Structures are given as C-alpha cells and as structure tokens.
Image: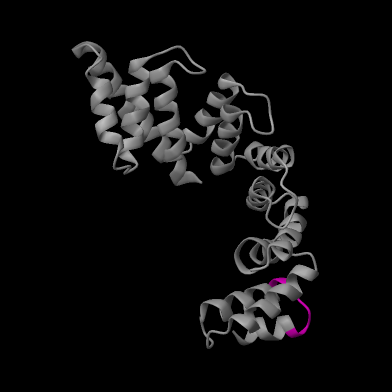
Amino acid sequence: MKWYQKGADLGDMKAQCNLGVQYFSGIGVEKDEVEGTKWIRKAAEQGLVDAQRLLGVKISKDDSESAKWTRKAAEQGDRESQCYLGILYSEGRGVPQDDAEAVKWCRMAADQGLAFAQASLGIYYNNGKGVPQDDAESVKWFKKAAGQGFADAQRNLAMNYTLGQGVPKDFSEAYVWSSIWAANGAKEAPAFRDEIAKKLSPQALKLAQARARKLHEEIQAKKGKQ
C-alpha cells in the first residue's frame, strides 16, 4: 500500500490506478470509493487504458462521462471498451443511438477475439440491425464465440442447425451444440438436447455424443489457456 501511495504521489499512473483499486476494494486500506475514483481518474487522465476502462465501464454513473472514458480506452484498442462503447451506441446511452456505430465498435472487439462481442455481432447480422441481414454471417460469428465457450452462442448455433437457418438443417450438429450448451450449465439446454436426440438414429446419436464430448474437451482446454 505505501509503495503504491509513494508512486501515486510522484505521478506514476500505474501506481495511481492500483491505489485507486485498493481504495475501491478496501484491500490494505479502509474502503473509500471517492478516494478510489480520484486516483483512478488521475491515471486515466494520463492515458492509462486500464484506468480509462474502469472509469468508463465500471465506475462512472453518468452516461456521458461513461461514454467519454470508454471511448478513450476503445480508441487505444481495448477490446472490452470497444464492446461496451458498441453497447452504449446500441442503447443510446451517453451517445446518440446509432446501430451502425454500435456494429463498428462491436466488430473491432470481435476481431480481437472477445467472445461476447462475437456473439453480439452474430445477433446484429441475425436481426439486420446496423448491417444487412445475413444468416450465414450470423452463424460465422456464433461459431467463433461458441468455440470459446460462450453459452448463448452455443444455444444459438443449436437453434440454427435445428431450423436450417444460415446452415443446412443438421440434427446431429444441433445435438452436438445443445450438448455443449448443456455442459455449460444452462437449465433449459438438457430438455432441448433430448428433444433433438429423438430425431437421430441410435448410430447417429452415438456419433454425435462422441463428437460433443471431444469438442467440449477442446473448448475447455482452450479456455484454460486463455
């Protein structure tokens, strides 16, 4: 604590941010969100992206202030801030509502591999908001997010394969993704998976179960390395 304080007093932006986080969390010091915000703001004003993200995404209660700091971090390439700025544009909070801008910032984060942004981009394409409606493009982004273990995207993929939306109708693939979705703990997933299972022959079901286990293990291993 004392080293962070010394560094912060000397203007070290990382020390200022760390000191602010300690005040927010009450670690090593009495919890004081006002004092925490003061030090995080000092770091943000010096351009520290972590501090800008904290102010924009977590701390600021005012939408305009939140958008201001989120944009600063987003423009430095911070993917979480890019995604959040997209949400602000989508909802018209702190910025004018603009679906095209929402998609632009969401895509930046998705291109950097943020699963939530990838799934969100899939929904934009599915709904035709901010982009032309495109089921195949929607599926592409759902697959990227699902492959990182994002449960909502796994559900959406299962639905796509069940309905033949953006992909050929394939109950085996629908079973695979609904199984992985279920393994993620979604309460409604087992019933959906079991309904799909009824549409498969015993041999096709066995193959789908094996593929689901293998793919789930691969996804979990990938998540463990992140």
The answer to whether residue 202 is visible is: yes
Seen at 51% across and 46% down, the residue is 226
**x, y percent for residue 115:** 54, 41
**Is residue 143 found left or right of 54 in the rendered image?**
left
Q: Position of residue 65 (x, y in %)?
A: 73, 65
The residue lying at 44 percent from left, 38 percent from top is 152
Q: Quadrant of residue 151?
A: top left
Between 21 and 95, the one nearer to me in the picture: 95
Residue 22 in the image: state x and y as whole percent. Answer: 57, 78
13 drawn magenta? yes
Residue 31 lies in the magenta stretch: no
Q: Is residue 170 above or below residue 107?
A: above
**Count of residue discs:** 0
Q: Nearer the viewer, residue 67 or 225?
A: 67
Seen at 74% across and 41% down, the residue is 101
The stretch in magenta equals: 9-14
Name the image quarter holding residue 187.
top left
> Vertically, is 216 above or below 29?
above
In the image, 49 versus 185, the foreground residue is 185
Quadrant of the rendering where the N terminus is positioned: bottom right
According to the image, what is the colour scheme of the structure?
A: one colour
> Which residue appears farthest toward the left when viewing the image?
202
Q: Is residue 88 above or below residue 115?
A: below
Could you tell me if residue 149 is visible in this image?
no
